[in-house]
Image: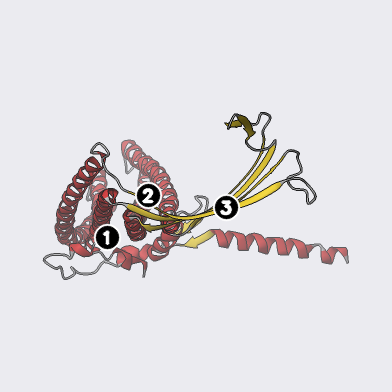
Amino acid sequence: MIKRIRPIPLLLLGLLFSNLTYAQQQQLTLKDALNYAVENNANARKSKLDIDGGKFKTQEVRAQALPQITGNAALNYNPIIGQLVFNGQAVQLGNKWDSNARLQLSQQLFNQQVFTGLKAAKTSESFYNLNADLTDEQVIEQVANGYYQVLVSRQQLNVIDTNIKNVKVVEKIISNQYANGLAKKIDVDRIKVNLTNLQTQREQTINAVVQLENQLKYAIGMPVNTDIVLPADEFSKIETMPVLADSINVAGRTEIKLLNVQKELYELQRKAYVAEYYPNLSLTANISTTGQSGRFDLFSRNGSALYYDASAIGLTLKVPIFDGFATRSRIRQANVDLRKVDIDIRETTNGLNLAYENAKIQLRNNINTIKTQRQNVQLAQEIYNSTQNNYNNGLAALTDLLDTENALTEAQNSYTQALLNYKIAEIQLIKSNGNIKSLLK
């Protein structure tokens, strides 16, 4: 009975570890990586928290326009009681013990600074929303570039593996020829050196792939120890040259929207400074009760304490007259900020147009390069196959074979690099059009 029961927990434990291993390995498409990043990237998360902080800031400013109610209470012991001389007689002012409770209300009736601050706080919410959008776009661009970098490194690793496989075949042939006296030892040594170099290059490329994958996982906010699998067909999704517009709608770009909101905030800040010239009118009201006694029996029902109440309602008007030109200086500083943001808008607009034009040029060049390099790889492969066949038949030297192998490797790497350049240019073009978030869909 014991022998039958024991394997069951072991089987369950094995299934558990199998499920954990499967859970740790995730096939990560570009779309999955980008959607994961906008939810988990540290900068993206903080920018979304800024949105909540902006809402709370608006509530804080709004509170200044609401009634302000305060309560005060005091209990005093007077060891020495002051006196007032009246008609030649000293009159005692107060008692040994006194208490006071006061409730005060104030309400802003007219305060242009508060009203302007409310508008600024509401505009700040738009600023934080746009800043979060811009952060998401930057994260998408960063992650997409890193994603393709990983794919390129993996492609390069595949090229090296193929070359190692081919060299091992040649090594086996040369070794057999050398054993039969048909090849020189220097040929055996040269092919071994070539194989060793390729294996060293493979180790370096593997380390580079691991580092790039870790950087990718860090960028998207994924635990670095998570195993990921990137589908290799992402590079096969290269289409023909898209239809390119002569210009883009720069006003729709998040960067320009953000600067426009920033300009609006500067304008509201200037209005707030101008509002310092305006008078402020507020309503005040208070009610209080005061008790006095010669003994500490202020809170006793049968004590000797005497209580009296008081209340007041009034208006407070504050009129600024002269502040040493401080307000004027603040207004002029705000004017400088407004002129600077206008410069930023013009420069950013020009920069966005420049990025779009460069992206178009890069995309055209890269498509042509991809076509050329694809043909070059095919040609290099044919030359290598022909040279290898000639070498096997004794019609070509080992040097020719190694040269054609190096040419094939260079052509394959150039083709892979052209694919990467195309994808990066494609991302820049999509970003220039203001549609980079379309990569999430």
**Residue placed most toward the observer, 79 or 402:** 79
Return the x and y of residue 30 as percentages of the image width and height: 38, 63
Give how far apart the Cα atoms at labels 1 and 2 are.
Answer: 49 Å
Tag 3's secondary structure?
Answer: strand
Report which residue position mark 2 lands on: 164
Looking at the image, is 189 positioned above or below residue 357? Answer: above
Q: How many marks?
A: 3
Residue drawn at (18%, 60%) of the image: 363
Task: Tell us which disc is closer to us: 3 or 2.
Answer: 3
Q: Earlier in the sequence, mark 1 or mark 2?
A: 2
Task: Tell us which disc is closer to us: 1 or 2.
Answer: 1
- Contact flag, marks 3 and 1 (Cβ < 8 Å): no
Q: Earlier in the sequence, mark 3 or mark 1?
A: 1
Return the x and y of residue 70 as percentages of the image width and height: 54, 52
> Is 204 on the left or on the right of 334, as rendered?
right
Quarter of image, res 199: top left
Report which residue position mark 3 lands on: 310
**Residue placed most toward the observer, 367 or 133:** 133
**Residue placed most toward the observer, 167 or 154:** 154
Residue 254: which disc? 1
Tag 1's secondary structure?
Answer: helix
Give how far apart the Cα atoms at labels 3 and 2 are.
Answer: 98 Å
Q: Which of marks 3 and 2 is nearer the N terminus?
A: 2
Return the x and y of residue 119 as percentages of the image width and height: 33, 60
Name which residue type carries label 3: Ala
Name which residue type carries label 1: Thr
